[in-house]
Image (tube, rainbow, N blue to C red):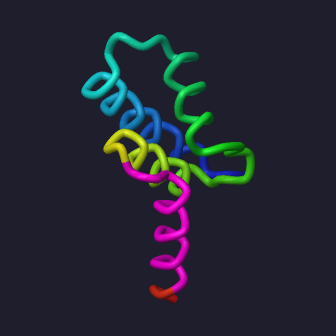
Amino acid sequence: MRDVNRIEPFLDELGEIWKERYPDWRFGQLMYNFFSSYGDPFYLEEDAFMAAFRAYSKGENPKEAVKRYYEEKRNKK
């Protein structure tokens, strides 16, 4: 079973970025635009998803952000 405690921090950060950067967008609009930029997020864990979403919100390449995230995670081991 996945840790349900991961959900609240994820939603909190997503909500903060939404409010700060895209307050006029509907949720579907926000996700559609992000997915159009990133692609299919089906296999992303929440932390990798958030790395991509943070990058997207800053106008950076979300796919590159996920690559960096996984490289940093690999280097910490």
- The residue at 55%/72% (across/down) is 70
From what the image shows, is residue 47 above or below residue 5? below
Q: x, y percentage for residue 30?
A: 49, 23
29 or 2, which is in the foreground? 29
Q: Is residue 61 magenta?
A: yes
Whether residue 42 sits left or right of residue 36 in the image: it is right
31 vs 43: above or below? above
Q: Which of 32 and 42 is in front in this view?
A: 32
Q: Which residue is drawn at 33% across and 33% down?
A: 17
Coordinates of residue 27 in the picture (x, y in percent): 51, 17
Extreme-left residue of the structure: 20
- Spot occupied by residue 74 in the image (x, y as percentages of width and height): 54, 83
The prevailing secondary structure element of the residues shown in magenta is helix
The number of numbered badges drawn on the structure is 0
Instruction: Residue at 47%, 48% (x, y): give it.
Output: 50
Please state the extent of the stretch shown in magenta in the rendering: 60-74
Point out residue 24 in the picture as x, y percentages from the top left corner.
Answer: 35, 10
Residue occupying image coordinates x 39% and y 50%: 55
Q: Using the image as rendered, state which of residue 77 and residue 64 is in the foreground.
A: 64
* 37 lies left or right of 23: right
Q: Please tell me whether residue 74 is drawn above or below residue 42 in the rendered image.
A: below
